[in-house]
Image (cartoon, coloured by chain):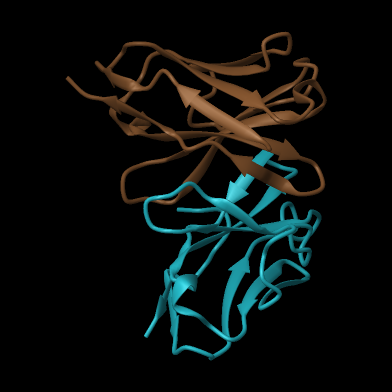
Amino acid sequence: QSVLTQPPSASGTPGQRVTISCSGSSSNIGSNNVNWYQQLPGTAPKLLIYSNNQRPSGVPDRFSGSKSGTSASLATSGLQSEDEADYYCAAWDDSLNGWVFGGGTTLTVL
Amino acid sequence: EVQLLESGGGLVQPGGSLRLSCAASGFTFSIYAMSWVRQAPGKGLEWVSTITGGGGTTYFADSVKGRFTISRDNSKNTLYVQMDSLRAEDTAVYYCAKDSVLSGFDYWGQGTLVTVSS
């Protein structure tokens, strides 16, 4: 059981906009920044979004993040086949004194 | 270019010990916190432990507290995790990650597989 809650799966057709949610509590998302990671099949995770809505250099601008209260979301506009991957949200938890992850969402491009 | 290279994984019996290493390059190692994150086969990511840049403060997930020890040698740009009293549920790919306060785990190694089985 993950501390942060994500839907296990999401899907969309090429060009479509897809959103993945991440729900937490006041001790994690409610008081700290949210980061998102993309894990392509068979590879190590990669930082996709940091500090709720910032993109590292090299991440396409079709990926965006937002946070409101104790929830966050990752949006992919203009979905592409190469976006098929697992996506994880994460935040520092002040009560647990450690990082917590969501269970991950598998994004399928139909 | 930032590079993180883990080593030390392998097969170990339940109750046994293993030490993983992570050699870092391409950044000023001593000023960044470093973390271990693991992923059991077919499962999601689980944070394991974090150590501050100077090594003075460490954090552990409850699942490994008292069994794992994290350390670093800033003169060798290397991160370690000593894993004792290993259990079957510790079986996972272990990733080391550069841990930035502002941007989370901004670089990851390729991972090393630890299998705990008799």
Vertical placement of residue B82 versus A13, above or below: above
- Name the spot of residue A105 as percent of width and height, x first: 47, 67
Q: Is residue A16 visible?
A: yes
In the rendered image, which quarter is residue B18 located in? top left
Which residue is farthest left? B118
In the rendered image, which quarter is residue A9 located in? bottom left
Vertical placement of residue A107 versus A94, above or below: below
For residue B11, side relative to residue B6 (left or right): left
Nearer to us in this view, B54 or A80: A80
Q: Residue at x 36, y 41 (%)?
A: B40
- Name the spot of residue B16 as percent of width and height, x first: 32, 11
For residue A89, side relative to residue B51 (left or right): left
Q: Is residue A97 visible?
A: no
Q: Residue at x 71, y 42 (%)?
A: A95
The colour of chain A is: cyan
The chain that appears brown in the image is B
Vertical placement of residue A109 versus A57, above or below: below
Q: Residue at x 78, y 56 (%)?
A: A33
Which residue is farthest front? B1
Q: Residue at x 58, y 88 (%)?
A: A17
Nearer to us in this view, B109 or B114: B109
